[in-house]
Image: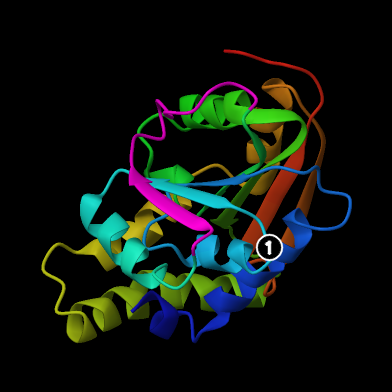
Amino acid sequence: MNHLLTFGIDHLWRNFTARKLLHDQTPEGDVLDVCCGTGDLSLALGKRRRTIYGIDFSPEMIEIAQRKAKRHPDLHFTVGDALDLPFENDRFAVVAVAFGLRNVCDPQKGLAEMVRTCKPGGTVAVLEFSMPTLPIVRHCYQFYFRTLLPKLGERFAKNRDQAYRYLPESVLQFDPPEQLAERLTQLGIAGVQRQSMTLGIVTLVWGQKITKIHQ
């Protein structure tokens, strides 16, 4: 349903993120996908020939991710809490989260855990929905997000828990990209950058961990 409701563009967002985070200058080492859900970002990252670890609070989602990864021996999925990651300090070359940080009850602690498990010189990244700045795009986006998307979700997904009403509400209440960038800077991430995609519908925020920071 998420692929359908974004007209498949979400694949492009994840693939762009994988290319941006994993390139020739990226330090050697494994990658952690936090709040990995059913593993879509992990699969995109796995195309870059790295060992990927995905963790999510939902056993049902992890079960689906594991089925997707049957033919990918370098992808490893486990159930776990983003607020208490079961990994040692300075473990991963890249620690990323896509469309999951806003679902964590304490986003600041979640970010701190991501920073803790990232090795010095590694990258911490957040891919999340954002609000377009162009007025006409913003208006159309809000109409689709608040009005059409919940109805489509309830109709085609037969959703009784109003998950597709929660989605726009959680996005609108979450930090804008500039505030998210500031959070990362406060946690010791240097050179924080922002890259908006699809007219500002989503934004990738990322930066490098320079020294050991153990919260």
Q: Is residue 133 visible?
A: no
Q: Is residue 73 visible?
A: yes
Residue 131 is situated, as x and y percent measured from the top left of the image, at: 59, 60
Q: Which residue is mark 1?
A: 49
Q: Of residues 18 and 100, which is closer to you in this image? A: 18
Is 13 left, or right, of 66 in this rendering?
right
* Residue shown at 44% from the left, 76% from the top: 143
* Residue shown at 21% from the left, 80% from the top: 157
* Residue type, label 1: Arg
Is label 1 in a helix, a strand or a loop?
loop
Q: Does residue 154 sit above or below 89 in this rendering?
A: below
Q: Does residue 168 sit above or below 212 in this rendering?
A: below
Residue 123 is situated, as x and y percent measured from the top left of the image, at: 73, 40
Residue 144 is situated, as x and y percent measured from the top left of the image, at: 43, 78
Q: Is residue 205 magenta?
A: no
**Secondary structure, magenta segment, majority class:** loop
Q: How many marks?
A: 1
Residues drawn in magenta: 73-90
Q: Does residue 192 sit above or below 22 in this rendering?
A: above
Q: Of residues 1 and 116, which is closer to you in this image? A: 116
Q: Of residues 72 and 19, which is closer to you in this image? A: 72
Image quadrant of residue 200? bottom right
Which quadrant of the rendered structure holds the N terminus? bottom left
